[in-house]
Image (cartoon, grey):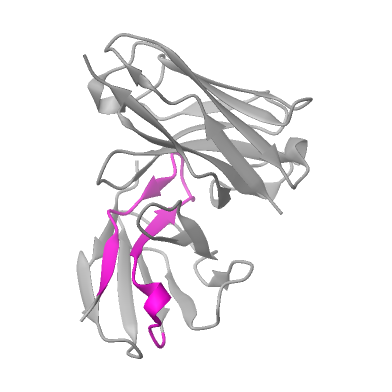
């Protein structure tokens, strides 16, 4: 059974930093690209970032580019999101999501999601 | 980026009736379109990808159609567990983008 378990969400002040983690199990982690997707309270879904299966390629939404860094440790079956210079508009539930397609080319659609970790940016 | 527009925002349907949800892309996304279901307090669940392929374990009452810029999700006979918010998402162009959602509520 595929499981994705996020952690690290807290209340942080504007301008602060935070690192989210996602522990994966139930599939061959290093076969798949992984994503972060967020959802502001009461709002829709926004894709945030993608990392390729080997960590060699990363992509970001314009809204977080230059402030967030995605990474992975395939030896630990873990995905991370380093979030710097946080803003109020980054307040959201952050989901870790598995890409549907194995291999080099990420499909960009998500077949398994974690339950999310809540990041609140507030003074 | 490609803008995805869903309609209606809210759909009121009686159990057992058919529900038809629409999704429009601001430019062609070919068949690279997915649908997700989200219930309150839960993560989204993949229903359909490739515009019409049901994901693993998704009941046959869910079907997707369309290509290019116009897409439809049909729920043939609504069950109590189907009342939720539904999102479409394109993955033809980066970044992947989602529609604003359609809430299917009990009439």
Residue B32 appears in the rendering: no
Q: Magenta segment range?
A: B76-105
User: Residue drawn 46% across and 45% down?
Assistant: B93
Q: Please identify the quadrant where the N terminus of chain A is shown.
A: bottom right
Image location of residue A37, percent across then percent down: 45, 39
Left/right of residue B94 with respect to residue B40 in the rendered view: right
Q: Is residue A36 or residue A94 the one in the foreground?
A: A94
Q: Magenta span has A54? A: no
Left/right of residue A78 with respect to residue A118 in the rendered view: right
Residue A122 vs B2, above or below: the answer is: above
Q: Please identify the quadrant where the C terminus of chain A is shown.
A: top left
Residue B58 appears in the rendering: yes
Image location of residue B82, percent across then percent down: 40, 74
Q: Is residue A80 or residue B54 the one in the foreground?
A: A80
Residue A35 vs B90, above or below: the answer is: above
Image location of residue A62, percent across then percent down: 36, 26
Q: Magenta span has B88? A: yes
Quadrant assignment, res B12? bottom left
User: Residue drawn 57% across and 24% down?
Assistant: A80
Residue A72 vs B44, above or below: the answer is: above
Quadrant assignment, res B54? bottom right
Left/right of residue B49 with respect to residue A47 in the rendered view: right
Image location of residue B41, percent across then percent down: 38, 52
Total marks placed: 0
Quadrant assignment, res A87? top left
User: Residue drawn 30% across and 62% down?
Assistant: B24
């Amino acid at each position: 059974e595929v499981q994705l378990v996020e952690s690290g969400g807290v209340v942080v002040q504007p301008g602060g930093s935070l690192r989210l983690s996602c522990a994966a199990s139930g599939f061959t982690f290093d076969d798949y690209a992984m994503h972060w997707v967020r959802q502001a309270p009461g709002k829709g879904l926004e894709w945030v970032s993608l990392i390729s299966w080997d960590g060699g390629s990363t992509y970001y939404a314009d809204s977080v580019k230059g402030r967030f860094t995605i990474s992975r440790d395939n030896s630990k079956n873990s995905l991370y999101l380093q979030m710097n210079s946080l803003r109020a508009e980054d307040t959201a539930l952050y989901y870790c999501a598995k890409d549907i397609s194995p291999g080099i080319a990420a499909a960009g659609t998500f077949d398994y999601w974690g339950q999310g970790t809540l990041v609140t940016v507030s003074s | 980026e490609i803008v995805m527009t869903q309609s209606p925002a809210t759909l009121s349907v009686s159990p057992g009736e058919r529900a038809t949800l629409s999704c429009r892309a601001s430019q062609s996304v070919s068949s690279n379109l997915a649908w997700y279901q989200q219930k309150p307090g839960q993560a989204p669940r993949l229903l359909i990808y490739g515009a019409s392929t049901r994901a693993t374990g998704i009941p046959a009452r869910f079907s997707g159609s369309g290509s290019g810029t116009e897409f439809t999700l049909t729920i043939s006979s609504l069950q109590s567990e189907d009342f939720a918010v539904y999102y479409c998402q394109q993955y033809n162009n980066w970044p992947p983008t989602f529609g604003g959602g359609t809430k299917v509520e009990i009439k």
